[in-house]
Image (cartoon, rainbow, N blue to C red):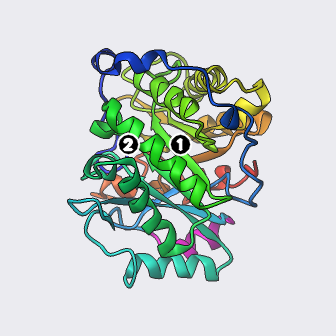
Amino acid sequence: MRKTIGVRLAAPLLAAALGPAALLSAPATSAAAAPAAAAVPGLAAAPYEYLGWGSPQKPTDVMKATGIKWITLAFVLSDGGCNPKWDGSRALTGGSDEAAITSIREAGGDVVVSVGGGSGNKLGEKCSSASALAGAYQKVIDAYQLKALDIDIENTEFGSATVRQRVVDALKIVKSKNPGIVTYVTMGTTPSGPDAAGKDLIKRGAAAGLANDGWVVMPFDFGGHSGSMGQATVSALDGLKAAVKSAYGYSDDAAYRHIGVSSMNGKTDEAGETVTTGDFRTILGYAQQHHIARFAFWSVNRDRACGSGTDTEACSSIAQSPYDFTKIVVQYQG
């Protein structure tokens, strides 16, 4: 997803890299017993906005037009070493990104900051240990006094068993040092749920005792699916719920409350694959029925029709009114 949106590694190639970790031990009691994230008004509905390209709208304009309170800002990357910067180049503080966060908060909203994405240098790979990676995440948290952090793990970061373990261990450190912080881990998926690497990541989280608030899938760029994209998303979420329930030993209700979805609006990177507002309403119904942890999408930048010659990263490539998709997502309250 995101930027080169939708880079994926085939499950058979990933499975070979799983090694002994594919048969991980039973989940740690502390994680299995962990409650879902405390209710934070509006946090469950936090679509992504990328301020680096795609003719980004002013976040406060989005808030006024839709009623959305939380926005997920993307992406924090490595500057080439184990140091976080916006897009790998812009300082965390003193620039336009910090100013945008301040404006959102002054308007009564707040932000989730997303680390990772489909391209660029990843902190999970550039930081050589879990403690170093946790330190990089902590710099982001401290810069904005964050209440929520999203790790969007994709591409080579997702494909490495070593890095998957490092991310899990780093997040456990973050959880211990920042009581109450909400964490999400976002990854690709098949129409039937997480692939081998995704299941391995969840199992590693459970085995480490990571009380992650939301395991989130991106149900698009499938490489083929049956039925509508809304139906394929429901199928993917059912598979995710089963994987989380199995790894953590949760009840059905608790498992649902620890999963989430980050869809894509309009035409995706894959020819012939389109996510409609009807599909979003299907996802909304599922979210409301099961009280999932998160309903987000990529992206606010694209939540408008295209003009002549418009960059498709700045529009959905389908007929729509401005913010049709955001106006559906904002109806979800957890």
Residue name at image x 62 percent, y 64 percent: 147
Position of residue 234 in the picture relative to residue 310 (left or right): right
Q: Which mark is residue 319?
A: none
* Residues at marks 1 and 2, CA–CA distance in whole angstroms: 10 Å
Query: Is residue 309 placed above or below 291 in the rendered structure?
Result: below
Where residue 320 sits: x, y (%)?
A: 53, 51
Residue found at the very far left of the displayed protein: 80
Q: Main secondary structure of the magenta part?
A: helix
Residue name at image x 45 percent, y 49 percent: 170
Sequence-earlier tag: 1 or 2? 2
Where residue 43 sits: x, y (%)?
A: 67, 57
Task: Give the residue type at disc 1.
Answer: Ser
| Residue 60 inside the magenta-drawn segment | yes
Task: Give the residue type at disc 2.
Answer: Met
Question: Is residue 178 among what the camera can see?
Answer: yes
Q: Say which residue label 2 marks.
A: 1
Local crowd at mark 1 within 10 Å, few (<14), some, or many (≥20)?
Answer: many
Q: Say which residue label 1 marks.
A: 262
Snapshot quadrant of residue 270: top left
Where residue 61 sits: x, y (%)?
A: 56, 74
Q: Which residues are magenta?
A: 57-67
Snapshot quadrant of residue 256: top right
Question: Which image quadrant: the N terminus?
Answer: top left
**Dot 1: element:** strand
**Dot 2: element:** loop
Question: Is residue 270 among what the camera can see?
Answer: no
Query: Is residue 191 placed above or below 205 in the rendered structure?
Result: above
Q: Are marks 1 and 2 in contact (CB under 8 Å)?
A: yes
| Residue 14 inside the magenta-drawn segment | no
Query: Is residue 273 placed above or below 4 in the rendered structure?
Result: above
Between 22 and 131, the one lying in front of the other is 131
Where residue 118 sits: x, y (%)?
A: 32, 45
